[in-house]
Every structure is written in C-alpha cells, then in structure tokens.
Image (cartoon, rainbow, N blue to C red):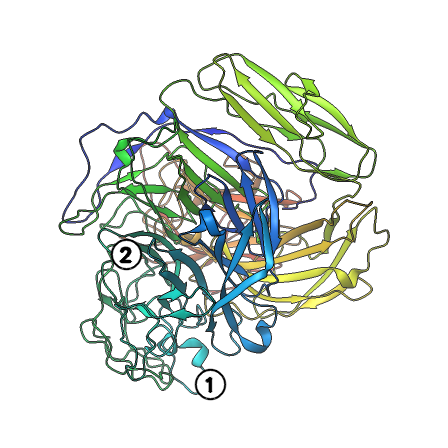
C-alpha cells in the first residue's frame, strides 16, 4: 500500500438501513416515543481525505470548525467557511511505540480564549520517558501558536518501555476538569495473551501490577485534574484517593485499565463517564488461566477499581499464574484484590473491582451481547437533541441521550440508551450497518447536531492512504448532493497540468446537478461541467474546489489538495518480497530505494525503515533502521512478543522519505510504502474473513457447502507445498485453495479429504495432509473453499496449515499426500 499514487478520491456514502438487536443485559430501556429514523435520510459527507497521516482525534468548535490531530504532531483545522483544511501548527513529538500526538480537548472557554489541550510525547522521550499534556492557543486565522504552550502535567512512563498500550485520550468537562486516559505500558503478550503478572526478577515490563494495579502510579488509569490558568494543575475533590493518602496518587479517578483508548462522554447531570478499554489477546479461554480476551465498555458512575490485570467482564477472575514453575496458582479475588507484587509501590489491599457494563470478544456467537464482536472497543459521544437548534442536518429526537459505541477492528457503530434509574445499558441498535467505515477512530457531535467521524484507514503507519474526516447529516427535506471528486495527479513539477473529475457525484433525490470549479481560490468560476482541466504555473499547495448545486438549490463542496512545483517521492522496497515469509526472531535484511525528481539522487541514509509486529488489524511498532549508502540494511525485530501460534501475527515493514521541497513555495512531501511478511504456519481459526463472517468467528473451520475463509496478502514464490493439520467426521470434503477470490485460480487442491476418525467436536482425531502448490505469481489473498456432494454434510476442521519448501514438515505419523492420491 503506497501513497505514491497520482490522485485521491473523495467518497460520498449514503446510508442504507438501521437494524435493531437486543443485548444480554437484564434491563432494557429505550426511547419508543418515536420510530427509528428512515436511514436513507442520512448522508456521509467528505470533509477531508487527502494528506492525512495516522489521524488520532477530533474536536468540533462552537462555530463548527473541526480541529483534528495526527500522530506525527500536526494540528489541523477544517473550516466550514472555506470548506477546506489547513495545518494550524506542528508540535514537536517523538513518535515511538503507540505514542506521538495522541490526545486533544478544547477548553470550556475555547470560543473566547482559543485554548485547547494536547497530549504528546516530547522529542526527548528516550531520555525521560514522559508524555506531556499542555495547553496551547489557537489564534484567529486557525494558527496554533507554539509559544503559547503552557505545560499542565508530565506523566512518567516506566523507564525503558517503548510505549506499549499508552492510551492518551483527553476529555474536558464544562466545569474545567480534565480527564486523561493512560495505558498499562506493559508488554502485551509475554503471558500468552492473558494478563501480564510476571513477578520474576528482571521481568517488570511484563507485570501490569506495577502500573494498572499500582495505586502509586499514573499508568493504567483515568486521571482527573483541574488545569491552572498559569500552568500546572490542582486536584479536584472526589477522586479515588484523597490528597495525602499514603502510597497513592491523588490524580487517580479510576484504576485497573489495560488500554483505555477512548473517553467518550461526560454527563454533568448524572456525573457519569462513558469510556472503553481494550482487552488482552487470548482468542479462546484457558481453564487454567481465565477467560478469552474481552474488550470492555463502562459507564463509570463513581471513582473505583475496574479490575485489570485481575478480573474482567462482569468480574470473572484471572489466575495468579506461577511464572517460575509455569503452572496455575490461586485465582484472583475480585471482591478484595491484593497486589503483593514486588513491583508494586502502592497499596497492597485494593478497592473492590467494579464489573464492566458491556463486554465482548473476538467470537461473534457469544451468549452475552451476541451482536458485538471484534477487538477494538471505542466509546463515542452522547447525543442531546435540541428542538430549538435550527440546523437542517441535526440528528432526530430518536437519538436523544443515546451513547455511541464502535469497534476499530470490525468497523461497526452501535448506539444505546442508558436507564437513568438503574444505570443499565438498554437496546443496542447498529448505526448504518451498510455504510463503509474504515477503522473509525473518533466520533463527535457538532453544534449543528451532525456527527463528525474521523477514520484511521486500513493501512499501516504512514501508508494508511484511505483515512479521512467525514460528517454524517440527517436531512428531512431536500438532500444535498454527495460529492465524489478525483484528480489525475496530486503533485508534480511546473507547469502542472491537472485533470479533475466529479462525474461520480450523485444526488440522493435524483435531482439534476450543476458544477462550478474554482482552481485558483479567487472565488470566480474557472470551469463548469463534471470534468475540467487546469494548469498551475505557480509553485505551492493549491486547493481546487468543485461546487455542486442541485435543482432545488442545495449545495455541496468537494476539495482536492494539489502541490505544484514539487513531486511526491516514490518508495520501493526491493527486498524482501511483499507477502513472503519470515519467522519471528529472525533478522530481516532489506533493500529500499526512493526516487524524487526535485531531489535528484536520493541519499538512502535519509530513508526511514520501520518494523511493526502486525497483530490482527493493527501493529505494534518495535523498531526502525536507516539503510546504508548502498540502500541496504537489516531490521532486528523482537520475537512475536509471546503471541504464539494462537494469535494472528505477522511482520510489517514500512519505508518513508520526506523530500527537501521543490520550487519556491512548494512544500516538502513524504512518500511511503509497506509490505507484510508471514510466519510459515497459521492456525485455521485465525482467518481474517470467511463466507461474509467477521474476525475470529469460531475456533475452527466448519463450512457449509461452498463456504470459505481467507488470509490476506500472501506471495507463494518459492513455496512448493501446503500442509494442513485437519480432522473430519466423515470423508468427502473437497478443499480448494484459490488466489484472489473464492473462484480465483487454483493454488492447491485437497480432493476427497479422508475421514480421520473424529466423532464430535469434543473428540477430534487429527492428521496431516500435503498438496503441491502452484504459484499464481505476485501477491494475493488466499481463499480456502470447501465443497462436497449434495445430500451429505461432512465437517472439516483445520487446526494448522503450513507453507513449506521441499518435503513435509510436522508429525510423520498420519501424514498423507494429496498429490499421491493417498
């Protein structure tokens, strides 16, 4: 995935329907005064989808500007008056681990003061290991004044930790209190996907009792402070520990979190905080260690202890694992947790653990909250309906007081009311299930009653080139056009000829459309019609704009960003090959090159090459390197950090280069690309898509006739054989592995898979089977497709499959050869 492409597309999406489902909670409470809104009345409008790099947070101002931040330190503002975005300023940050510029909140008096709060990791992170929250001023003209910085609080992270599970979200209350979310900063997976409670000497990095369960540490917490006008902060009354309490920090409002990535809403009337916490990585439960990894959403009604690393869900305990002898210990006590870790500097006897309100795991068919699945719970805003708001795009009364819950990994958004008497969440309703959301990162309602959505995109690091900022409107009457516009190039030397195309624009009401183009920003139309051409003779960043008007007078605007006088660099990772194979713990030699017309011969030592441990649909940054003058180098990543074969993990290698700018006035541009490498063995249950089913549906593959599962982005160059470990209840399954789609070219075939002797799900007998591989060339998603004669329904369970060169690897006993016909 590369940002070297010629143009960017502005997408406009129309929602299709709302579907309502009921949770497993005891008390359902929903507003039935009005029927659900007609979903086709929602429209998803593009505000910005070009020049975004790892967007993190948004904040909508009282005058409907949208402030949004990117992890590399850029602060941007989308202005409704200009219908375009500008870079307000840049904060110097050290991007490491999951850190960078990660938190944003507006001051209560922002409308008059321009004050906003940012949470970031300073450039000297490697010396001090602190993240900082500071107040800045956004001056008129959408300029962030760097000299206005007023530091509020430095949060000490564990010394030497690269930034694991750091959270960082901010939430400001109307009365001036600031909530800060911090992660446990513990190694995610040295505990086989279960809570890290490793108390052995030298292993403190794998002990969340040092952070989350430590009352004397600010990590793994939700903090609440009151920023002072001149900098620094005070402790407001009502936190978990009163000031002066021995071995505690008074900043702590709530404790016991792993990665509380989002603080969604504070309700001043009920004094409740809506938030979500990411869970551990165990895909399935282990009777000796505890439940599978669950994400949690909680309505925090009062300060308290929320369990990590001792308990999860509705207070289901984990085991106090004996790491010295590698065996189970006693079970943690959720009612009276004890932190006796040698890494603890706080209280030993902790507050009782408060259970979560909503919790779910990778398994879609769980009995509780059966419609929720995934691994990236995010807490969104609460909507308050204002009948006096004249905005024609405000959400209808049906959403009044509903809170939003969404999942970063599986791309769904839900809404739910909360019973004001019991505090229990009520009916969950999926919001726009047929709309496309690309890793929703942040949601916020604006003063217009519209929902603003920031999407991270599906790429890795700098290469997520489908990220964007959107607004979702609800309109009862005539609806505005949905603009879709693209350009032939996004940069290039002078003179720069640009072809633009808005012919994919649609009108929800079927109205005729009129187009007006402004290429030079003077407000005077330069062209009409759905397509146009323009040549830029002046260097700089330009924002061509198309204004589309329907027959009833409704207007929509689409913007593009074009840099004239400079060309975006092109990056190529020449080796290793995208989609190839490498085991964990191996060094990864690489060769990378960058080309840039303005810079001439690119000095390879200025290219940055990064390594991330890919896990499900996100990555854990683990290292970086600079190539030598010959454009080669070696990445030395860690192992799989304890994930093991139970998890879907892989390698992500990225490369980026920022050029020196072009002609006078032409800004510098960054090009980037990435590739993935796979371990040679995967568990079948870790497939990423399957017969229309989401992430981690089922422990094993039990297909209906013609069903399939798939693994993405695999290159079979040099692979001779594919071996699977399987179990069947009867013979007769034909398994075909195909490239690109369930009907694509055949890669490997396992005809008439034999009966292994299994009689039930609980009595599986496994064998190994090997088939020859035909390389289709290049990189493809691989689809495992099952079929069998009509009238039969055998069951095939695939536990492992392995890509290999030469003969079979694995148990010799029971091994068969598909090519030999058994």
Q: Is residue 248 visible?
A: yes
Q: Residue at 53% across / 55% down in the picture? A: 137
Q: Is residue 598 left or right of residue 388?
A: right
- In the shown orientation, is residue 580 left or right of residue 271? right
Of marks 2 and 1, the one in the foreground: 2
Residue assigned mark 2: 298
Question: Residue 202 bears which disc, if any?
Answer: 1
Against 324, is 568 above or below? above
Image x and y of residue 612, in percent: 57, 61
Residue in the foreground of this view, choosing between 588 and 186 = 186
Query: Element type at marker 1?
Result: loop
Q: Mark number for residue 544?
A: none
Asked if residue 786 shows in the view, the reply is no
Picture coordinates of residue 309, whole percent (x, y): 32, 71
* Above or below for 526 versus 613: above
Mark 1 nearby-residue class (10 Å; few <14, some 14–19, many ≥20): few
Mark 2: which secondary structure?
strand
């Amino acid at each position: 995935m590369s940002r070297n492409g010629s143009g960017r597309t502005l997408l406009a999406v129309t929602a299709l329907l709302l579907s309502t489902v009921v949770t497993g909670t005891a008390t359902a409470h929903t507003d039935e005064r009005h029927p659900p809104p007609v979903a086709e009345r929602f429209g998803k409008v593009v505000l910005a989808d070009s020049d975004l790099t790892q967007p993190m947070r948004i904040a909508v101002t009282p005058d409907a500007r949208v402030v949004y931040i990117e992890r590399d330190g850029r602060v941007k503002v989308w202005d409704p008056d200009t219908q375009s975005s500008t870079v307000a300023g840049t904060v110097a940050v050290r991007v490491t681990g999951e850190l960078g510029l990660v938190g944003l909140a507006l001051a209560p008096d922002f409308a008059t003061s321009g004050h906003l709060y940012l949470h970031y990791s300073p450039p000297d992170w490697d010396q001090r290991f602190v993240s900082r929250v500071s107040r800045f001023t956004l001056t008129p003209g959408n300029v962030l004044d760097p000299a206005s910085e007023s530091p509020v609080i430095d949060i000490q992270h564990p010394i030497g930790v690269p930034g694991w599970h750091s959270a960082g979200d901010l939430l400001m209350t109307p009365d001036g209190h600031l909530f800060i979310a911090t992660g446990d900063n513990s190694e995610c997976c040295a505990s086989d996907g279960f809570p890290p409670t490793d108390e052995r000497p030298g292993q403190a990095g794998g002990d969340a009792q040092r952070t989350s369960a430590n009352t004397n540490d600010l990590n793994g917490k939700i903090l609440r402070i009151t920023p002072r006008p001149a900098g620094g902060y005070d402790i407001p009354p009502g936190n978990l520990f009163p000031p002066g309490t021995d071995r505690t920090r008074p900043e702590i409002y709530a404790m016991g979190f792993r990665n509380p990535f989002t603080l969604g809403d504070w309700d001043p009337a009920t004094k409740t905080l809506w938030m979500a916490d990411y869970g551990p990585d165990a895909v399935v439960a282990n009777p000796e260690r505890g439940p599978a990894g669950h994400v949690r959403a909680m309505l925090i009604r009062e300060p308290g202890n929320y369990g990590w690393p001792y308990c999860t869900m509705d207070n289901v305990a984990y085991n106090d694992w004996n790491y010295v002898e590698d065996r189970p210990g006693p079970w943690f006590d959720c009612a009276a947790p004890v932190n006796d870790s040698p890494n603890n500097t706080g209280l030993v006897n902790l507050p009782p653990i408060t259970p979560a309100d909503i919790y779910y795991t990778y398994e879609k068919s769980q009995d509780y909250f059966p419609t929720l699945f995934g691994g990236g719970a995010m807490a969104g805003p609460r909507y308050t309906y204002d009948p006096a708001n004249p905005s024609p795009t405000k959400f209808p009364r049906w959403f009044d007081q509903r809170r939003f819950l969404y999942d970063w990994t599986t791309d769904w958004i839900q809404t739910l009311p909360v019973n004001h008497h019991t505090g229990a969440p009520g009916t969950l309703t999926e919001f726009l299930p047929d709309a496309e959301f690309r890793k929703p990162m942040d949601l916020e309602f604006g003063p217009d009653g519209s929902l603003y959505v920031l999407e991270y995109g599906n790429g890795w690091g700098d290469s997520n080139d489908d990220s964007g900022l959107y607004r979702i409107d609800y309109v009862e009457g005539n609806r505005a056009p949905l603009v879709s516009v693209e350009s032939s190039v996004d940069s290039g030397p002078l003179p720069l000829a640009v072809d633009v195309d808005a012919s994919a624009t649609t009108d929800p009401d079927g109205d005729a459309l009129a187009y007006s183009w402004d290429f030079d920003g003077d407000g005077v139309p330069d062209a009409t019609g759905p397509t146009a051409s323009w040549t830029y003779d002046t260097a700089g960043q330009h924002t061509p704009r198309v204004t589309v008007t329907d027959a009833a007078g409704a207007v929509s605007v689409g913007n593009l960003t074009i840099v004239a006088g400079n060309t975006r660099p092109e990056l190529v990772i020449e080796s290793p090959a995208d989609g190839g194979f490498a085991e964990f713990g191996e060094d990864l030699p690489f060769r990378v090159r960058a080309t840039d017309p303005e810079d001439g011969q690119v000095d390879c030592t200025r290219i940055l090459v990064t390594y991330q441990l890919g896990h499900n649909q996100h990555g854990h940054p683990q290292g970086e390197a600079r190539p030598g003058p010959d454009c080669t180098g070696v990445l030395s990543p860690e192992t799989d950090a304890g994930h093991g074969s139970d998890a879907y993990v892989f390698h992500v290698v990225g490369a980026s280069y920022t050029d020196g700018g072009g002609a006078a006035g032409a800004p510098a541009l960054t090009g980037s690309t990435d590739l993935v490498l796979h371990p040679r063995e995967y568990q079948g249950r870790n497939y990423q898509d399957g017969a229309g089913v989401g992430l981690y549906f089922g422990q094993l593959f039990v297909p209906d006739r013609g069903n399939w599962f798939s693994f993405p982005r695999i290159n079979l160059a040099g692979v001779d054989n594919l071996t699977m470990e399987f179990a069947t209840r009867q013979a007769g399954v034909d398994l075909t592995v195909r490239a690109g789609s369930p009907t694509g070219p055949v890669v490997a075939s396992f005809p008439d898979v034999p009966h292994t002797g299994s009689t039930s799900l609980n009595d599986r007998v496994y064998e190994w089977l090997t088939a020859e591989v035909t390389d289709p060339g290049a990189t493809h998603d691989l689809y495992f497709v099952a079929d069998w004669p009509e009238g039969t329904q055998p069951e095939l369970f695939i536990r492992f499959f392995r890509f290999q060169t030469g003969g079979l690897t694995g148990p010799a006993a029971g091994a068969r050869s598909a090519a030999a016909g058994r």
